[in-house]
Amino acid sequence: NGAGTFNVANINKITAGIGAVQKANYTGIIFDVEEVSGPAAGVNVAFGKAFAAAKKAGLTVAITMSHSAPYACDTPADAVAMVKAWAADTNVDILSPQLYSSGSEAKPEFAETNSCVAQGCTWDLYAPFKGVFAPSIVDAARYDEVKSFF
């Protein structure tokens, strides 16, 4: 998409630039992960290093993704493996799945990511997460419905 695709090289650049985020007086960093290029085995290592560097710099680490997992990965299994790794990573403070597609939805979209749901990228992947689970919604009027769903 227009915001870019995550890959090991791009993630490593983020890791190298974490100090600039801290120096700019930001208190956190949000990874909007929707498209990923490369196998989860390598990408997860790179993400893990980025999350650890951000925590070491005193930043809150948040990840948002399209519905239950990134919608564009090399394989559906890669998408599942990434979400599992994020849910297990103690350096991740917030996971925020996007319950919308365009931002103009009248109701939250609880559908799991279509490109990988058959391989297991379901909401159950988030169960082991110990941080804050904060779904992204279109407006606050949808909060109660989202809270009831999860």
Image (spheres, rainbow, N blue to C red):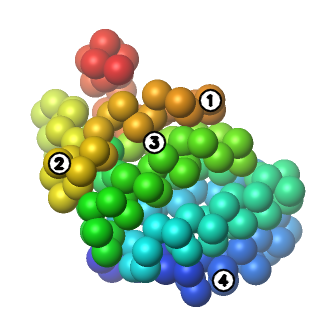
Kind of residue at disc 4: Lys
Q: Is residue 12 above or below residue 147?
A: below
Q: Earlier in the sequence, mark 4 or mark 1?
A: 4
Q: Identify the residue shown where x is 74% and y is 78%.
A: 17
- State the image coordinates of residue 2 (x, y, percent, origin top left): 33, 79
Residue 102, visible in the rendered structure: no
Q: Earlier in the sequence, mark 2 or mark 4?
A: 4
Instruction: Choose top left, top right, bottom left or bottom right for residue 93.
Output: top right
Q: Is residue 75 above or below residue 145?
A: below
| Neighbourhood count class around disc 3 (C-alpha, 10 Å): few under 14, some 14–19, many 20 upward | many
| Neighbourhood count class around disc 1 (C-alpha, 10 Å): few under 14, some 14–19, many 20 upward | some
Kind of residue at disc 3: Ser
Instruction: Choose top left, top right, bottom left or bottom right for residue 100.
Output: top left
Q: Which residue is mark 3?
A: 96
Q: Which residue is mark 1?
A: 130
Q: Which residue is mark 4?
A: 13
From the viewer's side, name the closer residue of 40 and 17: 40
Q: Earlier in the sequence, mark 1 or mark 3?
A: 3
For the residues marked 2 and 3, what is the alpha-carbon distance in whole angstroms?
21 Å
Q: Is residue 60 above or below residue 13?
A: above
Q: Indicate which disc residue 143 carries.
A: none
Kind of residue at disc 1: Lys
Q: Earlier in the sequence, mark 2 or mark 3?
A: 3
Disc 2 + disc 4, Cβ < 8 Å: no
Disc 1 + disc 3, Cβ < 8 Å: no
Q: Secondary structure at mark 2?
A: helix
Q: Is residue 49 above or below residue 105?
A: below
Q: Earlier in the sequence, mark 2 or mark 1?
A: 2
Q: Which residue is mark 2?
A: 118
